[in-house]
Every structure is written in structure tokens, then in C-alpha cells.
Image (cartoon, grey):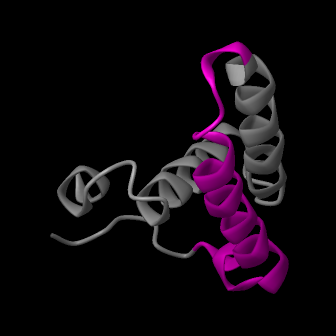
Amino acid sequence: MGRKNINRGFKKLRVWQNAISLYVLAYKIFSKFPFELKKVAANSIDAAHSISRNIPALGSCGEFHSCYESFKQANQITDDEYEQ
């Protein structure tokens, strides 16, 4: 499958790559929190995710692309889902 608009320069930035790694780590740690701390855990995961979403200055499209890239790396979506 050929990808459209693959020129995503922000993906080459170390700060963006580190932000994705931070999101993956936060997800792994905070998703194990007990039910009574789920809101705090969810806020922490979202805060970590927000870093990578704010780096690509391409508006909502860049933010969405950053989201599903981090979901893929955290194994929250499959490779097939990512390609779709």
C-alpha cells in the first residue's frame, strides 16, 4: 500500500521520538494502576501523550498522526490497523 503525504519531518526530531518513548513508558506504568487511581493514571498518560502531539505544527492532522504512531509503538493498535 502506497502512503500519501509521507513527508513528516517532525518524526526525525529526537525530541518527538523521545516524547513517543515517554508516552509508551507512561502507558506501561500507569495502565497498571488500580481502579481508584484510573483518573490520575489517565491524566498522566494524556499529559505524556500531549508532548508528542504538540510538536508537529501541522494542526489536527499532525496531532492525529502522532497519536496513532504512539498507539502503534505502544502495541495498542495492530500493524494492519495502522496501515489502514
Residue 52 visible in image: yes
The percent coordinates of residue 65 (x first, y second) are 54, 52
Total labels: the figure holds 0
Q: Which residues are magenta?
A: 8-36
Q: Taking 74 as reference, is 82 left or right?
A: left
From the viewer's side, name the closer residue of 84 and 42: 42
Which image quadrant is residue 57 in? bottom right
Left or right of 67, for residue 42: right
* Predominant SS along the magenta part: helix
Looking at this view, is 11 or 25 the one in front?
Answer: 25
User: Is 60 contained in the magenta span?
Assistant: no
Question: In the depicted view, which residue is nearer to us: 10 or 21?
Answer: 21
Where is residue 48? Give x, y as percent. Answer: 80, 49
Measuring 24% from the left and 50% from the top, which residue is drawn there?
A: 81
Q: Position of residue 74 (x, y in %)?
A: 48, 59
Q: Quadrant of the N terminus?
A: bottom left
- The residue depicted at 66 percent of the width and 52 percent of the height is 29
Q: Quadrant of residue 4?
A: bottom left
Residue 25 magenta-highlighted: yes
Residue at 68 percent of width and 85 percent of height: 12
User: Residue 19 appears at what percent x and percent y?
Assistant: 77, 66
Residue in view at x 55 percent, y 58 percent: 70
